[in-house]
Amino acid sequence: MLKRATLATLVLAALPMQAYAADGMVKLDAHVSTLGGGLELAMPMTERYTARLGFNQFKFSASENSGGVTFSGDLKLSSVTTLVDWRPWSGVTHLTAGVIFNSNKLELSGTVANGSTYDASGTTFTCAATGGCGVNTSVGFNKVSPYLGIGWSGQPKKQGFSFSTDIGILFQGSPSATVNSQGTWTAGGVSTTTTALDADAQKQLNSDLSSFKYYPVVSVGIGYTF
């Protein structure tokens, strides 16, 4: 009986929202942002509140050679956004809060020539392998990250095109680095293990990246209301 009453209450509470959504229609938005390119659906819940669900994707690769070390890297941006806009003045300005499911990742691979060095946490490691050594690094972020922002857009009430802009902060937490090296190494002329190199390099990277807890999000899009 309690379950039925609860279900009935939820259905009755949702009816006004569904009626408003039907009256206000739904907007499909294509955008470019610092999270990548993506698509988003926006549906008004009330006159002042709009729910948004979207995704973002982007990939960039680069390589560089310096001091006997060849670096190549891939930046992979992938996220799903679940946001709610609040229009305190019932106009084009909205304040936004929500959660972003963050799968952004940075992957780096380094090839160190025989006799070349790799510095980590104040220690100089020298590759002692004839065929060279390798250092692979992966940097990840919190999988679930809060988001706060402000933006300007038309509410999806009338059919047609509209533009939107959002500026906000993704609270992604301190990035976490993982280092995995291969080959034979020496430190101070003495043989050392890859475990020691990995620990020193990982410690330095996590320290260097600790200040990147906040990621700025800037988005520009064009949408169509159906």
Image (cartoon, rainbow, N blue to C red):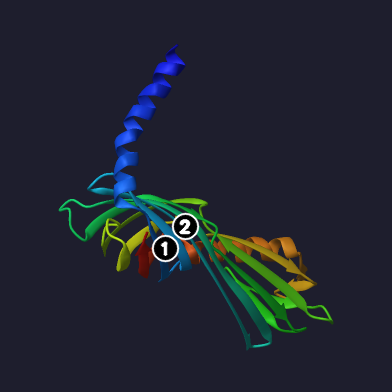
Q: Position of residue 16 (x, y in %)?
A: 29, 36
- Residue drawn 61% across the image and 66% down it: 201
Q: Is residue 59 left or right of residue 215?
A: right
- Residue drawn 70% across the image and 71% down it: 135
Check disc 2 and report its element: helix, strand or loop. loop
Badge 1 amino acid: Ser
Q: Residue furthest top?
A: 1
Residue position marked by numbered label 2 in the rendering: 174
How many numbered circles are shown? Answer: 2
The circle drawn on residue 193 is none
Q: Nearer the viewer, residue 45 or 127?
A: 45
Residue 172 in sight from this viewpoint: yes
Residue position marked by numbered label 1 in the rendering: 211
Q: Position of residue 65 (x, y in %)?
A: 64, 87
Residue 122 in sight from this viewpoint: no
Q: Is residue 141 left or right of residue 14?
A: right
Badge 2 amino acid: Ser
Q: Quadrant of residue 26?
A: bottom left
Quadrant occupied by the C terminus: bottom left
- Give the distance between the C-alpha atoms of the residues marked 1 and 2, in whole angstroms: 7 Å
